[in-house]
Image (cartoon, rainbow, N blue to C red):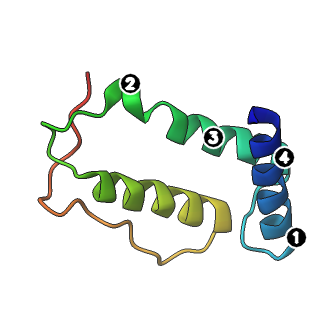
Amino acid sequence: LEKVYDEHLTDIFARGIAQGHFAASDPRVAALGYSGMVSWVYRWYSPKGSMTPEDIADQFLSLVVRTGSGKKGRKTPKPTNGKRAAVS
């Protein structure tokens, strides 16, 4: 199942790179980086923290879109309460 997931994610990044949505040059590396980013949330996220899961999702999406597209001018969403997530 993990292999299938990785293949699908790599394909998504390959199509995005081909269409100019991402500045990455290697879709496999982009997919692994993204997968790693979202796979480790359980290690540092705390429900007692100041960010909601939606806030974190917005931050992750902004990171992927801003960093991947190379487009300037996009604003990173701020947490709804203006604080950072609690980390352990």
Q: Which residue is mark 1?
A: 18
x%, y% of residue 56?
Answer: 35, 52
x%, y% of residue 79?
Answer: 23, 59
- Distance CA(mark 1)–CA(mark 4): 16 Å
Q: Earlier in the sequence, mark 4 or mark 2?
A: 4
x%, y% of residue 58?
Answer: 39, 62
Instruction: Choose top left, top right, bottom left or bottom right for residue 47.
Output: top left
x%, y% of residue 29?
Answer: 78, 41
Q: Which tag is nearer the camera, tag 1 or tag 4?
A: 4
Q: Which residue is mark 3?
A: 35
Q: Which residue is mark 4?
A: 7
- Distance CA(mark 2)–CA(mark 1): 33 Å
Say which amino acid is labelled 4. Glu
Q: Image height check: is 87 above or below 7?
A: above
- Distance CA(mark 1)–CA(mark 3): 20 Å
Say which amino acid is labelled 2. Arg
Q: Which residue is mark 2?
A: 43
Q: Earlier in the sequence, mark 1 or mark 4?
A: 4
Q: Number of marks in the image? A: 4
Q: Is residue 80 left or right of residue 72?
A: left
Q: Earlier in the sequence, mark 2 or mark 3?
A: 3
At x 20%, y 34%, the residue is 86
User: Crowding at label 2, few (<14), some or many (≥20) Cα neighbours within 10 Å?
Assistant: few
Element assignment for label 4? helix
